[in-house]
Image (cartoon, helix red, strand yellow):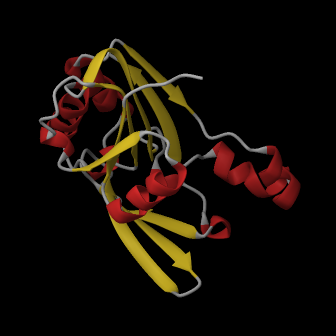
């Protein structure tokens, strides 16, 4: 078993994360704060964030977030995140409605262009806005923040997902993944 001092950055629902920690006792410390200025010191082996970086609206904000995260990690520490896929041209993306959401963006697809995600839930719709920053900007921000290794991982189909819905159902999602997983090592 690998034990580490972990930090999970959250943008919402700190009470839910803390309640789950109380129930399951995983030894994870949850913090709510501005990723651009965490001020925690290099005390962590692992930082995990879900859908955080796509809230950066320009390269300066992305760079500040990456510096804030890197400054919280010990040498050799890892940052792991799932994020809006900066390699996908959302103007040409298929409909993700079968998966419970849709995306739209402007025809002026440039740095900082808004990407609107609309989620279709049983009790109604809700939308969030993210921003387009390309892969090269992400790579530069990670390296400038002090990350020496950067790995991109596409989504993979679980055996349960294939069994429940069949592989053809997932083909559009996997061929044009709206999300990506990123692993960076300091």
Res 88 visible: yes
**Residue 45 placed where, x, y %?**
36, 23
Quadrant in which the N terminus appears? top right
In this rendering, position of residue 73 left or right of residue 77: left
In this rendering, position of residue 165 left or right of residue 110: right
Establish if 47 lies above or below 99.
Answer: above
Give the image quarter of residue 111: top left
**Residue 144 placed where, x, y %?**
21, 19
| In front of the other: 179 or 44 | 44
Res 106 visible: no
| In front of the other: 71 or 138 | 71
**Residue 101 placed where, x, y %?**
55, 68
The residue depicted at 50 percent of the width and 86 percent of the height is: 124
The residue depicted at 33 percent of the width and 57 percent of the height is: 130
Establish if 57 lies above or below 148.
Answer: below
Establish if 71 lies above or below 22.
Answer: above
The residue depicted at 36 percent of the width and 19 percent of the height is: 77
| In front of the other: 39 or 160 | 39
| In front of the other: 105 or 29 | 29
Quadrant in which the C terminus appears? top left
């Amino acid at each position: 078993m690998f034990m580490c001092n972990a930090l999970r950055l959250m943008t919402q629902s700190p009470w839910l994360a803390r309640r789950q920690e109380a129930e399951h006792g995983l030894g994870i410390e949850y913090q709510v704060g501005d990723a651009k200025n965490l001020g925690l010191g290099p005390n962590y082996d692992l930082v995990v964030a879900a859908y955080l970086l796509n809230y950066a609206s320009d390269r300066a904000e992305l760079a500040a977030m990456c510096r804030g995260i890197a400054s919280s990690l010990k040498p050799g520490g890892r940052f792991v995140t799932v994020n809006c896929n900066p390699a996908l041209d959302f103007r040409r993306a298929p409909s993700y409605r079968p998966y419970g959401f849709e995306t739209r963006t402007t025809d002026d697809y440039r740095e900082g262009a808004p990407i609107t995600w609309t989620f279709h839930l049983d009790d109604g719709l809700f939308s969030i806005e993210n921003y387009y920053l390309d892969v090269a900007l992400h790579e530069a921000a990670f390296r400038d923040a002090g990350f020496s290794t950067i790995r991109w991982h596409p989504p993979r189909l679980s055996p349960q997902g294939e069994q429940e819905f069949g592989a053809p159902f997932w083909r559009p999602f996997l061929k044009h993944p709206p999300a990506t997983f990123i692993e960076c090592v300091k």
